[in-house]
Amino acid sequence: MPKNRVERRSILKAAGAMGITSGFAEMALAFQTSGDAAHEVVESSTEAPPKHTIRFAVIGLDHSHINGITDTMLRSGGELAWVHSTNAAALAAFQKRYPGVRVARDEDEALNDRSVQLVCSAAVPNLRAPLGVRAMRHGKDFLSDKPAITTLDQLAEVRRAVQETGRIFAVMFGRMEQRSTTHAGEMVRAGAIGRVVQTIELAPHRVNEPTRPDWFWDPALYGGTLCDLGSHQADEFVHFTGSKTAEAVMSRVANVSFPQHPEFQDFGDMMAQGDGGLGYFRVDWLTPGGVTAFGDERTFILGTQGYIELRKTFDIAGRPGGEHLFIADGKSARYIDCSRLALPFGPRLVDDIVNRTQTAQDQAATLLAMELVLKGQKNARRV
């Protein structure tokens, strides 16, 4: 090994032992150099109280993501009006987490409440889009866990209902809950790396087999791995490239580790081409036990004047926590800790519900992302 590489490794190891990198968490907008890159911590000012209040109902508790969705709406001005679920165990847990919530006898009791403005759901995935259509036709906006749509026929029904009712069909993609991704979007829009050329996204997950319900293993119910996990990545591709049209030019799925679940797909990848740029992503359920997070999620955004890397869940190089952003441009290479930033999705969605705007999530872009993975899933080659 060349001498300069040995010296560089020794210097970085010593710096880590001295706690240099951990000190940056104590300062906002502070810089310090270590090796080749500057370090920065960005943080939001104190979050303002919600401007508006809305009433929302929760229908469908088949994935624990519903807790995050509910928490987001509660801190953003939402008042939890109803819950309905046919999953008795999940309903009991939800009532314990949110004491005092009214339990609807059936779906219609919540949908027919004219004071309810939004319906949220994490039902079994293939049931989400039909519920969303019913909610919109009852005059409600809809917020779903991903994947919100599992077939192209469902997508057509959603688009028709959006057009005919003027209601919002929103999807809680991972981007809405990730500070580093939100900050990267702001940097891209500001021209920090020039015009985006390509996104590359890697999204491994931990399967936790004993905890999974039966529907988890059936592509007819969860949509397949590109539809399910890949919907996050398709959303980011559309968001960062600004594409208005896009197509899947290559897609593959596989089952490499779960012969006991022969229809399950634990690996998938796809290449996309949009009118705003190119994209590639890989999703899998192969996170090893030595990884402390559910998966080492990363996004790479290549521009004409620089590039950004996101390490969303943890940094394999040793920085604590998640929400890590790295940027290299014509002037410098630097690291940005995004863990102190606010998440704007919830308040913006409440504003959109009240003002009939699209500041939280562009409706056409949301449905384009779902179309992209649905077509990729449908045409995927099994390997």
Image (spheres, rainbow, N blue to C red):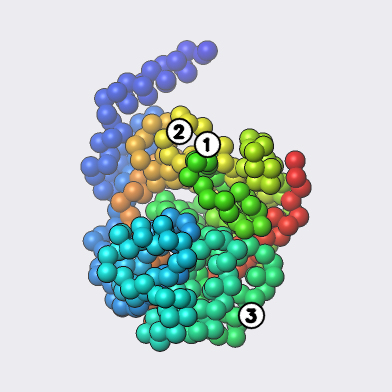
Residue identified by numbered label 3? 160
Residue 158: x and y, percent?
A: 61, 75
- Marks 3 and 1 sit apart, C-alpha to C-alpha, by 39 Å
What residue appears at the point 46 percent right and 76 percent down from the top-left corner?
Answer: 106
**How many angstroms separate mark 1 from mark 2 (CA)?**
7 Å
Seen from the viewer's position, the closer of residues 57 and 24 is 57
Looking at the image, is 179 positioned above or below residue 123? above
Residue type, numbered disc 1: Thr
* Circles 3 and 2: CB atoms closer than 8 Å: no
Secondary structure at badge 1 equals loop
For residue 202, say whether it is visible: no
Contact? badges 1 and 2 (CB < 8 Å):
yes
Pointer 3 local density, CA inside 10 Å: few below 14, some 14–19, many at least 20? few
382 up-or-down from 238: above or below: above
Q: Amino acid at mark 3?
A: Arg
- The residue under the point 35% across, 57% down is 93
The front one of 262 and 227 is 262
**Sequence order check, earlier mark of 3 and 2:** 3
Residue that carries the numbered disc 2 in the rendered image: 291
Residue type at mark 2: give it: Val
Q: Residues within 10 Å of mark 2 (few under 14, many from 20)?
A: few
- Residue linked to disc 1: 287
User: Mark 1 or mark 3, which is nearer the start of the sequence?
Assistant: 3
Whether residue 191 sits left or right of residue 230 in the image: it is left
Q: Residues within 10 Å of mark 1 (few under 14, many from 20)?
A: some
- Residue 56 position within the rendered picture, expressed as x and y whole percent measured from the top left: 38, 75
Q: Secondary structure at mark 2?
A: loop
Residue 378 visible? The answer is yes
From mark 3 to mark 2, how far is it between C-alphas? 43 Å
- The percent coordinates of residue 179 (x first, y second) are 39, 53
As drawn, is 64 to the left or to the right of 223?
Answer: left
